[in-house]
């Protein structure tokens, strides 16, 4: 990029009812960080803004469950989230929070300006009310059937199944999330932003004006909303947690979280400017500034319809240049779920994989859900590290540094005459910055990460083809040129890898003993990024191989989570009808041992067993083949109902029933005696 440009980059405010997980990272924070770092490296004026979203009903629900105050909840998770981002290398210029005084002031002033200019509609109407809890049911305090898709667990403001936004009163069969009661309705007053007035403008600005440069998934969702017709949207709620509505007659009401949260970008910028002694307004009000919102697809409506309508109504703010929303990242084939603990939490990853921030950054970027939902697996994470970062990137750097130290005591040699291969290699190196730039500027970070790896591949191929470890014996002067060229590639890598792998970049600069005096654009302009006679440092591994045991530990953790969820959600069968003691005494249950087990052909579930039940050895057909291999249950102690009437199954007469139960993961388990010394034929009573 030749001319310096001012950028305001925002990343969706993480909600402080839980930590940050890999879905958040892949969808928002890693791509935004790559973009911000790249723009800084190419000489632009950049602020990268974020903060904790700390208001709204889910916070109050979690606080009630844990018996603490909402402030306790947001303080806890704000601290965890902020530290996780810092440790992970997310380069925010400011990370604020919506409970901060400056945010309350900024959001209140924004509301009052629109209120004073008559931009809101004031209406009194019926809202859902829980008489037992003595409060109105805002958003997440009510669940019911979505009027559009029929999802029976839709929230009052949005259906997570189909993504439709609606009012709580639109729900079919609504229930209070507080008491479980069917709510009544009660008159209350609120202020609404008339989105319908901005419908024509939004269509012209986004659907028509940005049809060639915004993502198709973003345009599609915006068009769908507009085609359905926009309606006035309440900007206030009956709630005691949030920013009080700053007008008379609004006691017990707060700004709706979707209204106050995006203003958090502005208040966070103000906080940064006050700290740095700068003017915040050019970053939000100068038409030359480019505003970019990084979000997940569930936030498209707020950043492409509601927040722009708010900014348009206010009148003095710029509008986003782009909103490159990503799709969702799944985990091991299942949707990431905070409530079910089905996630890889960032703070736990940093504990389990210390000093491997860049490995996760790379794995998430290489598999980014840019155009469709993607799946994170620990095996792919391991492969990205071992087969790409270690075997390609790290291997090239290690060979270059080791050979330079071995042959020249770490001093970069003076090159001799360049061969055609040398010139071609240096020319290819010069082209990589613009190729990577093109991908980043089009928000194709996955593509950009692979171009970065291709530069490392170029270095590996060059060394493999030139074989300096062999040539040193017969032509030592040639080796000087080879290592000189290889070191130019290594230096280029240290620069262009910084947006993707910032910790690796810093480490590589240390190994090469260079400072930030080489710029991104320099790679395209010169053949000499690192000069002869410069002394580099000793070799050290940039990446370490991740072993199977480390991956298995993570898979075991997820399996434990899955089993815990299944156990928690397991429906216990109701008690059967009461029987008399005499009925029970009719059952003859004996201890036995399985002597033989074979799979019954053309069946999925059936095994044919020979069981010693003490009285005799009998044949029993049992539907346990999906839980056990025949060879694994030879010698297994079992309990058998021996006086069950014989039954023919698949042409085999079954002479009893083995007693089983279910495990949390849906498998079967034997009911067996605790003491192995219990003899076959002993009765269970």
Image (spheres, rainbow, N blue to C red):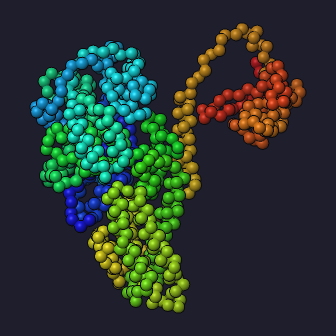
Residue 135 sits in quarter = top left
In the image, residue 360 above or below residue 55:
below
Relative to 73, residue 374 above or below: below
Q: Nearer the viewer, residue 347 or 287?
A: 287
**Residue 416 in picture, x, y percent from top left:** 40, 89
- From the viewer's side, name the closer residue of 514 and 429: 429
Q: Residue at x 44, y 75 (%)?
A: 401
Q: Residue at x 72, y 36 (%)?
A: 604
Q: Residue at x 34, y 59 (%)?
A: 440
146 left or right of 322? right
The image position of residue 379, as x and y in percent, is 54, 53
Note whether residue 368 is visible. yes
- Residue placed furthest toward the left: 116
At 26% across and 61% down in the image, what residue appears?
A: 40
Side of 150 relative to 130 (left or right): right
Q: Is residue 74 visible?
A: no
Q: Is residue 469 left or right of residue 285?
A: right
């Amino acid at each position: 990029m030749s001319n310096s440009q001012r950028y305001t980059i925002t990343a969706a405010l993480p909600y402080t009812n839980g930590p940050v997980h890999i879905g958040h990272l892949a969808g928002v924070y890693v791509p935004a960080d790559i973009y911000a770092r790249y723009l800084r490296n190419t000489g632009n004026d950049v602020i990268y803004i974020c903060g904790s979203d700390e208001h709204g009903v889910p916070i109050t629900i979690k606080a009630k469950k844990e018996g603490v105050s909402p402030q306790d909840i947001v303080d806890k998770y704000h601290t965890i989230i902020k530290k996780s981002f810092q440790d992970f290398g997310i380069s925010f210029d400011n990370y604020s929070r919506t409970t901060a005084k400056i945010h309350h002031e900024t959001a209140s002033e924004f509301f009052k300006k629109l209120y004073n200019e008559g931009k809101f509609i004031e209406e009194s109407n019926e809202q859902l009310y829980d008489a037992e809890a003595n409060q109105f049911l805002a958003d997440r305090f009510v669940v019911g059937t979505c009027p559009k898709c029929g999802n029976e667990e839709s929230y009052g403001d949005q259906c997570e199944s189909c993504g439709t936004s609606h009012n709580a009163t639109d729900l079919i069969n609504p229930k209070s999330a507080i008491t479980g009661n069917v709510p009544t309705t009660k008159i209350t007053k609120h202020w609404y932003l008339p989105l319908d007035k901005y419908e024509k403008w939004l269509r012209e600005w986004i659907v028509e004006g940005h049809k060639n440069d915004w993502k198709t998934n973003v345009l599609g969702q915006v068009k769908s909303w507009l085609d359905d017709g926009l309606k006035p949207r309440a900007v206030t709620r009956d709630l005691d947690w949030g920013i009080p509505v700053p007008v008379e007659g609004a006691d017990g009401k707060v700004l709706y979280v979707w209204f106050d949260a995006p203003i958090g970008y502005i208040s966070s910028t103000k906080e940064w400017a006050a700290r740095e002694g700068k003017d915040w307004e050019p970053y939000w009000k100068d038409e030359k500034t480019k505003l970019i919102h990084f979000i997940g697809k569930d936030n498209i409506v707020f950043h492409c319809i509601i927040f722009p309508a708010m900014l348009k109504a206010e009148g003095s703010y710029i509008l986003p240049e782009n909103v490159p929303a990503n799709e969702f990242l799944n985990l091991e084939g299942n949707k990431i779920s905070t409530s079910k603990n089905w996630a890889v939490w960032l703070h736990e990853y940093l504990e389990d994989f210390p000093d491997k921030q860049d490995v996760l950054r790379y794995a998430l970027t290489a598999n980014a859900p840019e155009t469709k939902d993607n799946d994170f697996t620990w095996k792919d994470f391991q492969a990205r590290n071992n087969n790409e970062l270690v075997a390609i990137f790290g291997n090239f750097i290690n060979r270059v540094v080791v050979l330079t130290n071995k042959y020249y005591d770490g001093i970069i040699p003076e090159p001799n005459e360049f061969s055609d291969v040398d010139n071609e290699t240096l020319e290819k190196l010069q082209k990589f910055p613009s190729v990577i730039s093109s991908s980043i500027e089009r928000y194709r970070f996955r593509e950009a990460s692979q171009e970065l790896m291709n530069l490392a591949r170029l270095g590996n191929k060059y060394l493999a083809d030139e074989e300096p470890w062999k040539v040193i014996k017969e032509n030592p002067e040639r080796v000087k040129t080879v290592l000189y060229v290889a070191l130019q590639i290594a230096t280029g890598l240290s620069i262009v890898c910084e947006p993707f792998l910032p910790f690796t970049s810093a480490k590589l600069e240390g190994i090469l003993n260079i400072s930030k005096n080489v710029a991104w654009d320099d790679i395209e302009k010169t053949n000499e990024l690192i000069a002869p006679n410069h002394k580099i440092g000793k070799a050290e591994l940039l990446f370490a191989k991740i072993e199977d045991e480390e991956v298995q530990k993570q898979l075991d953790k997820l399996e434990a989570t899955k089993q815990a969820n299944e156990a928690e959600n397991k429906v216990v069968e109701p008690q059967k009808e009461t029987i008399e003691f005499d009925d029970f005494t009719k059952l003859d249950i004996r201890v036995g041992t399985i002597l033989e087990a074979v799979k019954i052909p053309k069946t999925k579930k059936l095994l044919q067993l020979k069981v010693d039940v003490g009285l005799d050895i009998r044949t029993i057909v049992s539907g346990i083949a999906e839980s056990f291999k025949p060879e694994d249950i030879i010698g297994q102690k079992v309990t058998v109902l021996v006086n069950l009437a014989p039954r023919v199954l698949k042409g085999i007469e079954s002479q009893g029933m083995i007693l089983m139960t279910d495990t949390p993961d849906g498998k079967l388990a034997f009911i067996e005696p605790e003491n192995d010394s219990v003899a076959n034929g002993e009765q269970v009573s």
